[in-house]
Amino acid sequence: MLYSPPAVEWLAGIGRGTMGAGEYLSRLGGLAWQTWRALFDRRGAVVVRRQAMLQLVYTGVQALVPLTVASVAVGLLVFSFSLAHLPVDLVQSVASTVIVREVVPLLLIFLVIGRSGTAITIDVASMKLNDELRALRVMSIDPARYIALPRVIGVTLAFLVLQIYGMLAAIFGGYWGALLIDLELPAYPIEDLLAGIAHADVGLSTFKMLLFGPVVALTAILHGVSVERSRREIPIVTSRAVVRSLLFCFLLNTFVSLLADE
C-alpha cells in the first residue's frame, strides 16, 4: 500500500464528508418532494386526517405538562433578571424579543425532537423491519402519503399550538412567579406587557414553527427507513436523527433570526 501524506488523507476525508452530506441532503430533499406531492393526492383523505390528528395529540397535547414546567422556569429567569437589572420600559422588548422570538422556539426544538422525533424514528424503523412499508408498496399504496404526510402535518400543527401555549406560559408564569419570589421587584401591568409584544416577533416565531415541523418529521422518517437488517440499528439511527434534527433546527433558527434583524 502506498503511503499517503497526512494532508492528502485530510483532504480525502473532507471530500468523503462533503459527498456524504450532499447525498444525505439529496435524500432528505427527495423525501420532502414526495411528501409535498402526496399532499395533493385526495385518496385516503380520511385515513391521513386521522393519523395527522393522532400525531397532533401525541406531539402537542401530551407535551403540555413538560412544556408548562420548562416555559415557566425559563420565563421566571428572564423576568427576574429583567425586572431587577433593566429599566421598566425595556421589559416589554425583553419579553417580546427574548421569550417570543428565541426562548420558546428553542424550548420546543428540544421538547418535540426529544419526544416525538425519537418516537417517529423508532416507529418507522419498526415498520420497515416488519416489512410493513414493502407491503404498502405491493398494494400500490404510497408510503409518502400514508406514513410521511400525516406525521409532517401533525408535528407542524403541534409546533404551532405549542408555540402559542408556551409563549403565554412563559410570560404569565414567569412574570407572576418572579413577583412572588421577590416582592421587591417593580410591578408591571401585565396588560401593558402583552400589548408590548411586537406582532412581527410573533409572526417570526410562527414562521420558525412552520419550518421546524417538516424538518423534524422528515429527518426522523428518513433515519427510520435507513435501517437494514436488525433492531439493534434502531438506537443508532434514532440518535443520529436527534443530533441532525437539532443541528438543522438550530441553523434555521439562527438564520431566520439574523435575516429578520437586517
Image (cartoon, rainbow, N blue to C red):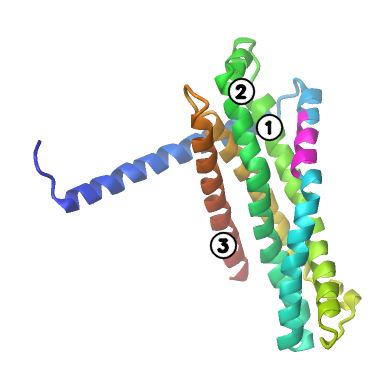
> Does the magenta segment cover residue 143?
no
Query: Would you identify the image quadrant in which residue 1 lies?
Result: top left
Question: Which amino acid type is shown beneath numbered disc 3?
Answer: Thr
- Which stretch appears magenta? 51-59
Q: Residue at x 76, y 27 (%)?
A: 48
* Crowd rating for badge 2 (residues with CA inside 10 Å; few <14, some 14–19, many 20+): some
Q: Residue at x 72, y 32 (%)?
A: 150
Q: Secondary structure at mark 1?
A: helix
Q: Which residue is mark 1?
A: 149
Which mark's residue is nearer the viewer, 2 or 3? 2
Q: Which residue is mark 2?
A: 127
Query: Would you identify the image quadrant in which residue 51 lies?
Result: top right
Indicate left or right for 34 with 169 as reference.
left
Q: Main secondary structure of the magenta part?
A: helix
> Does the magenta segment cover residue 55?
yes
Percent from the top left, x then y, of residue 104? 71, 61
Q: Nearer the viewer, residue 31 or 230?
A: 230
Indicate left or right for 122 with 6 as reference.
right
Q: Residue at x 71, y 44 (%)?
A: 156
* Crowd rating for badge 1 (residues with CA inside 10 Å; few <14, some 14–19, many 20+): many
Q: Residue at x 68, y 58 (%)?
A: 107
